Amino acid sequence: MTINRLLAGVMGGVMLGYIGLAKIANAEEYKAEGWKTPDVSSAEYVGNAHRDLTKRIRGKETEFEIYKNPDGSYFNKLKIKGNTFCYVVDTDGKLPMEYNLIDSEGDGLFELKTETDYKKIPEWVLK
């Protein structure tokens, strides 16, 4: 899977979520102790891109760091102002990505697991 195809798939899902064409209901699972996040240290860094995902911060504020796991699956690490707030996770090496892990409180715990069309950026990141 090329970086352009991977990023296009992720961004396509992001854009669909923002313009309201994605699924109406989002499945969410909350885990107070946080979900296990992908291991950046064992993954291969593929590249990055910047995208504008919120009107509250000017410009292309969201950095997508793209990684490939040894098993061929991918994940993206999303950051704003250097703060990681979301992992977009693929489990089978093919688009679409399967789920998001979100740090909804800014405490380093990724306690919210959602479908990938969930696009709410946590408030702590936008302050």
Image (tube, helix red, strand yellow):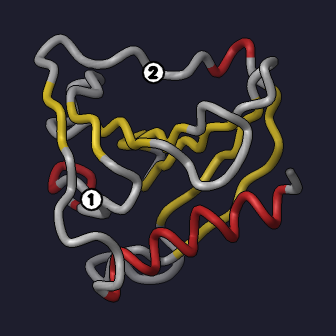
Figure check: 45 above or below 63 = above
Amino acid carrying label 2: it is Thr
Q: Are marks 1 and 2 in contact (CB under 8 Å)?
A: no
Could you say whether the residue bearing mark 2 is in a helix, strand or loop?
A: loop
Figure check: 97 above or below 55 = above
Q: Position of residue 121 (x, y in %)?
A: 27, 59
Name the residue that disc number 1 marks: 121
Q: Position of residue 47 (x, y in %)?
A: 80, 49
* Left or right, residue 64 beside residue 13: right
Upstream in sequence: badge 1 or badge 2: 2
Residue in the foreground of this view, choosing between 118 and 46: 118
Question: Residue sitting at 54 percent across and 41 percent down?
Answer: 77
Question: Residue sitting at 62 percent across and 67 percent down?
Answer: 50
Q: Residue furthest bottom?
A: 19
Classify the position of the C terminus by image quarter: bottom left
Name the residue that disc number 2 marks: 37
State the image quarter where residue 24 is shown: bottom left
Q: Residues within 10 Å of mark 2 (few under 14, many from 20)?
A: some
